[in-house]
Image: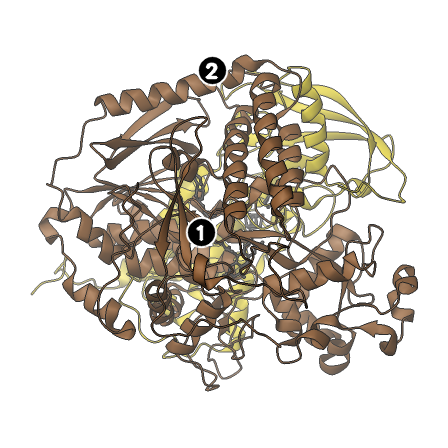
Amino acid sequence: MANLDSRIPPGPLADKWRKHKADIKLVNPANKRKYEVIVVGAGLAGSSAASSLADMGYRVKSIVFHDSPRRAHSIAAQGGINAAKNYQNDGDSVHRLFYDTIKGGDYRAREANVHRLAEVSVNIIDQCVAQGVPFAREYGGLLANRSFGGAQVSRTFYARGQTGQQLLLGAYSALSRTVGQGLVELITQHEMVDLVVVDGHAKGVITRDLVTGQLHRHAADAVILATGGYGNVFNLSTYARGSNTTAIWRAYKRGACFGNPCYTQIHPTCIPVSGDYQSKLTLMSESLRNDGRIWVPKRKEDCGKDPNTIPDEDRDYFLERIYPSFGNLAPRDVSSRAAKRMCDEGRGVGETGLGVYLDFSHAIKRLGEAGVRERYGNLFDIYHEITNENAYRTPMRIYPAVHYTMGGLWVDYNLMSNVPGLFVLGEANFSDHGANRLGASALMQGLADGYFVIPYTIGDYLAGQKPGSRPSTDAPAFRQAEENVASQVARLLGAKGREPVNHYHRRLGQLMWTHCGMARTRAGLEQAIQEIGALREEFWRNVSVPGSAGSLNQALERAGRVADFIELGELMCRDALTREESCGGHFREEHQYPDGECKRDDTNFAHVAAWEFQGEGKVPLRNVEPLHYEAVKMSVRSYK
Amino acid sequence: MVASTSSKLISVTLRVWRQEGPAAEGRFVEYKAANLNPNMSLLEMLDVVNDDLERRGEDPIAFAHDCREGICGTCSLMIDGKPHGPHRGVASCQTYMRSFEDGAVITLEPFRARPFPVQKDLICDRSAFDRIQQAGGFITARAGSACDANAIPVPKGAADLAMDAAQCIGCGACVAACKNSSAMLFVAAKVSHLGLLPQGQAERDRRVLGMVSTMDEAGFGNCSNQYECSAACPKLISHDFIARMNRDYLAASVRSVFQAESQAAGGGA
Ligand SMILES: Cc1cc2nc3c(=O)[nH]c(=O)nc-3n(C[C@H](O)[C@H](O)[C@H](O)COP(=O)(O)OP(=O)(O)OC[C@H]3O[C@@H](n4cnc5c(N)ncnc54)[C@H](O)[C@@H]3O)c2cc1C
Ligand code: SF4
Ligand code: FES
């Protein structure tokens, strides 16, 4: 049984963070230099953490598998970042952002963490502007805002359609500065392939140099994982091709609990699948829903027609119809499922019938084509490149796709996992979004964790570790971990089977999408667990990984990642199977209201499921952290 | 998944640069890719070719890629001699097979420039760009020290122009396109982005001097005003930024000679 003490500070919700910061143990400035911290990952969460810790005086090693920290997947975020600045004077506040996020997460997130997130959100914008992030501005020179799904105020800051890029480049510039100053050692093109645990504490990692193939041991006083989400378990997703679960999965196998693995977000506005060669799905930012209207034909017979010839009265603007108060800005899970229902009714559009229209003709009438171009030009360009269609003339076709994983390694209020010394930040942890994440809140969380939370909370752990007590890389745990990795590599290369790695990734993805995607059933999940087990066995027997261990070998990189995805897929199905309710992105067909909305079971499932590895081939243990709501009342989430 | 297209399938021949490692000799190898959906991306076509190679136990073609939507700057192919291929304003990953005729011969090489040594096949090492950033591509703002974000208004025009420059994805196509392997467009984009903002003024001189000298040390060549760089740039970063950087550099050099600096290095009392 893992020890899941959430360490939520006592006292009123709004005072917890302030009080915790005052009570937390500090590391004396002269001692900071004696501690070394490994930060794996340099997306928003990792690079903000690495530079902040370095500025405080810690010695930091930043490790990424990319060839530069600037390539992290955060770069692809389009729409924006939330903050409770209330610059629009429209009634926003820390409490409202907190409430929206808790409600958006369908009452499956920790109140204390979410409140802290809302509190520090305002500092993030200050920090980013100071770094030179070129946010959109009004003519008066002040910052501009837009609205995002699940909120009735305008609190989203953005930089054209490239907010993630600009925020990451800001964090990357801070990281670059600290590297240039010699405060951070930057190690690129190295993949963390194992966590080293010494006497129950995380004290290092093993990496594989992706250029030479060499394995390296790194010792530290604490390890931070900021390695992003695991949505590529579905093969097709809006993630970058290289995003993977290896770092957190291998940490799981070393004892870190995996929180709510089945909570995945399916984003409603992505470009539909066009063929079986497809390698990724492209997101059309949710911000488009500010001005675009989503519809399908009222009659099945009209689905094949040129949409411009279908008059307004024959169109079903289904989000506006079903959710009049939120309309096209209903949250993601709600909008995705509604689109799926329309297509299930046979009213989907496009060649595959798996698509709905996102129409800008009204916006163009209102704002002019130039006005729409100013707001969304680059998104229209992306759409054109991929589909060869002009969305200023005909409506876009969109369909839901896997986009984000709310689940991740379990962490306490200090963002420390149940393995002491192992901290997890950003999308890699499970902490702030419950069962569904609101748009523009992941960027907020990544930067909150890195700039404003970990700099305080890591001290609480390190203060208890004697300076200079970090183990040597000759310790048996390091040798054992390295041997473990080497033998896995040898097994993959030695299989010499008949199918390429992608073949297995594709099959896993299909299984996951069918049985653990937008709608899940007991029978489907049970079947998926069986089939994934068989797929795993076949993978290890029949995968073909050419080349050697001692060189740049992309097939080998992919093989290791897919091996981990297969195991994770099984855990996700198990988690989805045991969560006998529907909440947020987790929709069990057995648990719904007559109108198709999620039916939560707060009596039995108002908790975090934190899965604990029990050894190869053994069923993992499901630990539970109960969720207590003091400031908000759990209610049926309604956007009607 | 659903395979569907009304478009006619095409077949192409690839001439691909294969090079086992940094020190190995490279050569072109031919591959056939048949029955391709024209809506597939060039990189997806490479995936299909690689799946076939792997199925036969042969080493797949190594190529750099990640986001596959033109924003991470990882992909870096010379396609028929052009960085990022035939179209303006897109990255390699945004090149689709419909850009090629049925039966075409497509030549694929890595970006070629002395400061970007080949690691394997189509992958080159662009870490020199990171080193240039480390030499000044930042505004120093420690977490916790910032003032309110609206305390310093930034005129919309300046913010928009800064954003134009800030869009650089760090791919290196500008270098690959330049006969001198100059990195001026990349450096100018960063210098301009930060220099256009009020927050970037304090370090403006140090920034441009530091970045330019690191660029020179890394072995990038001089700019001879041919502007192949902006033509190849996937974000169409304007070469006007190079002129802006040159002015900044000149002014900073002059100031560094004539401006008195406090002798009390390191802060005094
Ligand atoms: C297309 C798209 C659009 C989005 N738009 C928005 C938006 O508008 N607003 C919003 O709030 N959120 C958005 N999101 C979500 C958001 O971008 C991500 O959740 C967030 O950026 C994740 O940041 P991160 O720092 O946790 O991880 P990442 O940015 O994914 O970084 C992961 C890092 O870990 C490294 N890494 C991973 N594994 C290893 C390993 N084993 N060894 C070494 N290094 C490793 C990588 O090299 C990388 O540096 C979007 C997501 C997508 C896919
Ligand atoms: S300036 Fe353009 S071509 Fe050069 S690195 Fe930046 S995006 Fe690439
Ligand atoms: S793969 Fe990211 S820009 Fe091409």
Q: Residues within 10 Å of mark 1 (few under 14, many from 20)?
A: many
> In the image, residue A242 lies at what x, y percent?
54, 39
In this rendering, does residue A378 appear at all?
A: no
Say which residue label 1 marks.
A427
Disc 1 beta carbon < 8 A from ligand 1? yes
Q: Colour of chain B?
A: yellow
**Tally of numbered tags:** 2
> In the image, residue A53 lies at what x, y percent?
26, 51
In this view, the residue in front, A72 or A490, is A490
In this view, the residue in front, B220 or A475, is A475
Asked if the residues shown at circle 2 and circle 1 are in contact, with their CB atoms under 8 angstroms apart, the answer is no
Identify the residue shown where x is 66% and y is 17%: A498
Say which residue label 2 marks.
A490
The amino acid type of the residue labelled 1 equals Glu
> In the image, residue B268 lies at what x, y percent?
9, 63
Q: Which chain is brown?
A: A
Question: How many angstroms separate mark 2 from mark 1 (CA)?
Answer: 31 Å
In this view, the residue in front, A365 or A180, is A365
Give the letter of the chain under mark 2: A
The amino acid type of the residue labelled 2 equals Ala
- On screen, residue A635 above or below A248: below
Label 2: which secondary element: helix
